Image: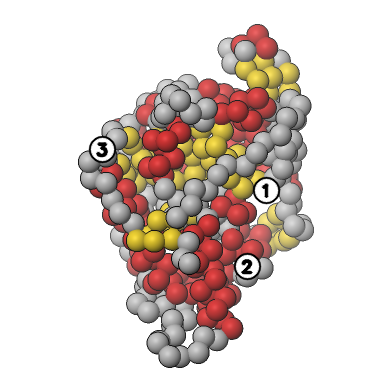
């Protein structure tokens, strides 16, 4: 029996909710068509339910420039490096996006999604059933990596109401970590995040960095790159008795969390993190009636079925992960081969069809977070 079925919309259900996808810009060029198709799929699936999708940018005079929605001149909203456009370093573009995610959630509430996400789980159900439902204990949702007490909420998909207490504290830490800085080099040493274990890379690697010489990727570099996740991890582990904030208790009782390995990256695990293998499988033709399914076609079918039926989303990577694993990711290959992500009668095309037209027949439940000790005690917010 199929674990997913054609999606039925409910036009009478019209929540007034903002879905915000913050990105530094998605040019209308063939290199970004696969990302535009992600956003169009969100629109086609969720706008009939009352959702509004914004793809935000930092393009001067753009109506979707982030400065039209949040006060980018305020030091309580974004760091000075963002305000003065002095962000530098290897990943200034990624950090530009990082620095506006928490401010948008704090001001408006809703959902932040990377544009690299193919969404299969029912965002509308999670929002109405839990995040905005006063009878539900959950008021925040996202993905995690690691296991408690090293459980860290990642930042590619976030859902909460406005002024969420966890997001507010994580944002405060972000602003402190960025004080006096224009990039995140050495940020893992900041006292507000140094109590959080470093992120781990499979092995230290040395890579060419796009004309900037050699780059070593180790635990420290990985953590600096994703220091916003460290800031969230710090807020998760913080106990501030004076302010009645118990991070571990909040995460255990209030956060609807999924493992990113099972909820966003099953295609990676099923192919040993090989973007080329994923690309080759998904571009295969689906066998016609009466044709025998090859072993590769069977694996491609299993990947599609696993993603659509049992995963919350598929997360595409385009930069850092390619350096980490030493090859093009699926997202990079779809970008290089425009249209390969949606070709008719292929497994990729089937995946795109299911993204809009199918819904899961079972509810994906959150992980059980056990009791764990705080990693920091003391005053956090001023």
Q: Are marks 1 and 2 in contact (CB under 8 Å)?
A: no
Q: Is residue 21 above or below residue 321?
A: above
| Neighbours of disc 1 within 10 Å: few (<14), some (14-19), many (20+) | some
Q: Earlier in the sequence, mark 1 or mark 2?
A: 1
**Residue 75 at least partly seen:** no
Q: Nearer the viewer, residue 240 or 306?
A: 306
Residue linked to disc 1 = 222
Residue 219 spot, x, y in % from top left: 74, 48
Q: Nearer the viewer, residue 263 or 368?
A: 368
Residue 89 appears left or right of 47: right
| Neighbours of disc 2 within 10 Å: few (<14), some (14-19), many (20+) | some
Residue linked to disc 3 = 14
Give how far apart the Cα atoms at labels 1 and 3 are: 41 Å
Please give the name of the residue rendered at 45% of the width and 55% of the height, measured from the top-left corner. 361
**Dot 3: element:** loop
Q: Earlier in the sequence, mark 2 or mark 3?
A: 3
Please give the name of the residue rendered at 32% of the width and 39% of the height, measured from the top-left corner. 65
**Dot 1: element:** helix
Please give the name of the residue rendered at 44% of the width and 85% of the height, measured from the top-left corner. 287
The furthest residue to the bottom: 291
Q: Which is closer to the viewer, label 1 or label 3?
A: 3
């Amino acid at each position: 029996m199929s674990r997913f079925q054609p999606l039925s919309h409910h036009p009478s259900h019209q929540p007034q909710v903002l879905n915000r996808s913050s990105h530094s810009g998605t040019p209308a060029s063939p290199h970004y068509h696969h990302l535009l198709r992600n956003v169009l799929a969100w629109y086609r699936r969720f706008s009939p339910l009352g959702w509004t999708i914004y793809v935000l940018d930092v393009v001067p005079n753009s109506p979707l420039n982030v400065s039209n929605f949040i006060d980018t001149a305020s030091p309580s909203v974004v760091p000075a490096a963002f305000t003065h456009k002095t962000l530098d370093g290897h990943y200034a573009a990624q950090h530009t996006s990082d620095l506006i995610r928490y401010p948008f959630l704090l001001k408006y509430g809703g959902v932040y999604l990377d544009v690299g996400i193919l969404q299969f789980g029912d965002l509308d159900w999670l929002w109405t059933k839990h995040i905005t439902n006063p009878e539900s204990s959950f008021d925040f949702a996202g993905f995690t990596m690691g296991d408690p007490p090293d459980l860290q909420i990642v930042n590619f998909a976030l859902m909460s109401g406005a002024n969420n207490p966890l997001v507010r504290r994580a944002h405060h830490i972000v602003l402190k970590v960025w004080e006096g800085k224009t990039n995140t080099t050495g940020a893992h040493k900041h006292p507000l995040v140094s109590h959080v274990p470093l992120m781990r890379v499979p092995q230290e690697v040395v890579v060419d960095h796009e004309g900037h010489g050699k780059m070593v990727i180790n635990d420290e570099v990985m953590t600096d790159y994703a220091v916003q996740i460290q800031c969230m991890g710090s807020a998760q582990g913080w106990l501030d008795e004076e302010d009645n904030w118990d991070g571990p208790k909040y995460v255990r009782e209030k956060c609807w969390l999924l493992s990113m390995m099972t909820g966003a990256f099953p295609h990676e695990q099923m192919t040993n993190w090989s973007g080329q293998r994923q690309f080759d499988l998904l571009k295969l033709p689906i066998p016609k009636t009466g044709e025998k399914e090859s072993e590769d076609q069977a694996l491609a079918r299993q990947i599609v079925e696993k993603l659509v039926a049992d995963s919350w989303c598929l997360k595409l990577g385009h930069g850092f992960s390619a350096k980490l694993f030493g090859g093009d990711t699926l997202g990079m290959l779809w970008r290089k081969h425009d249209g390969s992500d949606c070709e008719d009668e292929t497994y990729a095309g089937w995946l795109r069809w299911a993204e809009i037209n199918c819904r899961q027949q079972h509810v994906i439940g959150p992980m059980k977070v056990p009791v764990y000790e705080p990693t920091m005690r003391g005053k956090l917010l001023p």
